Amino acid sequence: MKRSVRLKSFELVAQDINDVDVELLHALSISVRWPHRPKDWDLLRRAGHGIVAVDGIGRVFGSAMWFPQGDDFATIGLVITTPRTQAQGGGRWLMDQIFEQCGDRNLSLNATHAAYPLYVSLGFTSEAIVYMRQGEAPQTLPAMPPLDGGLSDLPSDRLSEIAALDARAFGTDRAKVLALLAEDASIVTLSRGGEIVGYSMSREFGRGFVVGPTVARNDQDAVHLTAVHLKRLAGRFTRVDTRERDGVFAEFLQQSGLGIAETVTTMSKGRRFLNRADNGWVYGLAGHALS
């Protein structure tokens, strides 16, 4: 695999993402108006692997990461090229490096509008639209459907209680990612008949907070698992990434003041990623990179 590339006047080489100062990664995400803080970059580097494209004096011109989720699957994210090098082949070169590292794993990613044609050309197939909803969490929540079951907080040292539920909904075991997210997250579960049937997390990210992942069996459960966090975050900037375009859950988010800021496309390469099941569905994503 070619470890260097020339883009006009730039000779760039691939370097392990862990060997780069996090402030340079932060500056990279700022250059494309992504909200990731240095702390967010640090968490993502702990969760996965990646490379950066640097020039001879250490300036960062691009990045790409992949996150193992189980033994045969990975999500891809943080694929960034600076405005000065976009549309010059840098994104394809970065993806070639990631493909080499991922081997024969099945892959999924969430493509921005600008990057979508590149991923199509690399053999990715579209599966769904992700709606990034954000805004200030309301002081008063809108009307909600009746609560079926009981909500309770889950300590981070009891993640094993939601592991099987999450794996069924997500499609593979992502226990490592959940453990990292849980370090600084508030976790709530929904139980019925002595069984946990849904859960949600909320944590600091970017401009404020993100509610997700959220796993539930139906829209009504997802509403309550999200509402408990929104109530605690009243007045704070909050984001929910969801593949729900309409229905009870989407309407609840809209009425809560979380409008659609942008959309991305969930794509897969290899086996199909998304598989909605009656016993669980990911209503709120952990993030675009972690899905």
Image (spheres, rainbow, N blue to C red):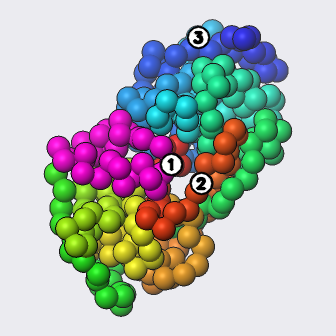
Q: Which residue is mark 1?
A: 171
Q: Which residue is mark 3?
A: 57
Highlighted range, magenta = 156-184
Q: Residue at x 42, y 41 (%)?
A: 173
Does the rendering let one see residue 48?
A: yes
Query: Image quarter for residue 189?
Result: bottom left
Marks 1 and 2 sit apart, C-alpha to C-alpha, by 7 Å
The amino acid beneath tag 3 is: Ile
Left-right relation of 15 to 111: left
Marks 3 and 2 sit apart, C-alpha to C-alpha, by 42 Å
Task: Say whether residue 103 is magenta.
Answer: no
Q: Image quadrant for the N terminus? A: top right
Task: Say whether residue 170 is magenta.
Answer: yes
Labelled pair 3, 1 in contact (Cβ < 8 Å): no
* x and y, in percent, of residue 117 in the image: 81, 45
Q: Secondary structure under badge 3?
A: loop
Count neighbours of disc 1 (C-alpha within 10 A) and say few if under 14, some if 14 to 19, many if 20 or more.
Answer: many
**Mark with earlier residue (1, 2):** 1
What secondary structure is the stretch in magenta mostly built from?
helix
Q: Which residue is mark 2?
A: 274
Query: Which marked residue is nearer to the observer: mark 3 or mark 1?
Result: 1
Q: Secondary structure under badge 2?
A: loop
**Mark with earlier residue (3, 2):** 3
* x and y, in percent, of residue 90 in the image: 74, 27
Query: Which marked residue is nearer to the observer: mark 3 or mark 2?
Result: 2
Instruction: Give the mark count.
Output: 3
- Towards the viewer: 29 or 119: 119
Left-right relation of 117 to 49: right
Q: Secondary structure under badge 1?
A: loop
Labelled pair 1, 2 in contact (Cβ < 8 Å): yes
The image shows residue 249, relative to residue 121, as above or below, that is below
Q: Residue at x 74, y 42 (%)?
A: 124
